[in-house]
Amino acid sequence: MTEADTMRQIKDNARTIAVVGLSPNQDRPSWGVARFLQARGYRIIPVNPGHEGKEILGEPVYRDLSSIPADAGVDMVDIFRRSEAVPEIVDEALSALPDLRTIWMQLGVNHPEAAAKAEAKGITVVQDRCPKIEFPRLD
């Protein structure tokens, strides 16, 4: 399967996306990407410990992935954090999200070891890409 095929499969099958590092600031890339995904019909679950208990884009904000109810059906995690934070996020996602199928790392974010760990568990991983850029190319 090509990289484009993989991203098309993600675009077509993801439903609920936890956005780690989602900012309430409309000028931040995380907000724009989350709003784009929400406008395309995906459910967004904001993850940002500094805004826990508030709302971003009309959705309640969770402190971390482990705080999201297991029945939320999160099947994709979109990471807006520095690359060095990725291993902890991946470990938490693997243990806390029973429906997880995809880990997506935003532009400039990559961690080959964490990606390999997730892939060994059957999770699809995309690194250093943005769904707001990639998804329209696949329409």
Image: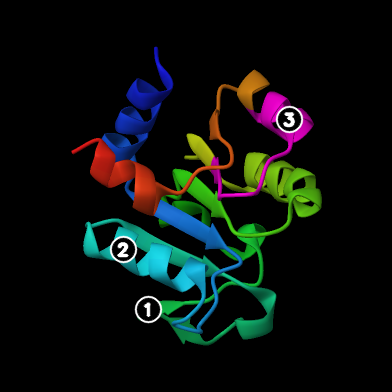
Q: Is residue 55 above or below residue 31?
A: below
Q: Is residue 22 above or below residue 51?
A: above
Q: Is residue 103 above or below residue 133?
A: above
Where is residue 123 shown, x and y percent of the image? Answer: 55, 28
Q: Amino acid at mark 2?
A: Phe
Circle 1 SS class: loop
Circle 3 SS class: helix
Apparent side of residue 64 relative to residue 137 in the rendered image (left or right): right
| Residue that lies at the very extreme toward the bottom in this rendered image | 54
The number of numbered badges drawn on the structure is 3
- Check disc 1 and report the residue beneath it: 57
Residue pictured at 36% horizontal, 25% vertical: 4
Query: In which quadrant will I find the C terminus?
Result: top left
Residue 36: give its label: 2
Q: Amino acid at mark 3?
A: Pro
Residue pictured at 22% horizontal, 57% vertical: 40
The magenta stretch spans which residues? 104-118
Where is residue 90 shown, x and y percent of the image? Answer: 69, 43
| Residue that lies at the very extreme toward the left in this rendered image | 139
Q: CA distance from mark 1 to mark 3?
A: 31 Å
Say whether residue 106 is magenta. Answer: yes
Q: Amino acid at mark 1?
A: Leu
Q: Quadrant of residue 7?
A: top left
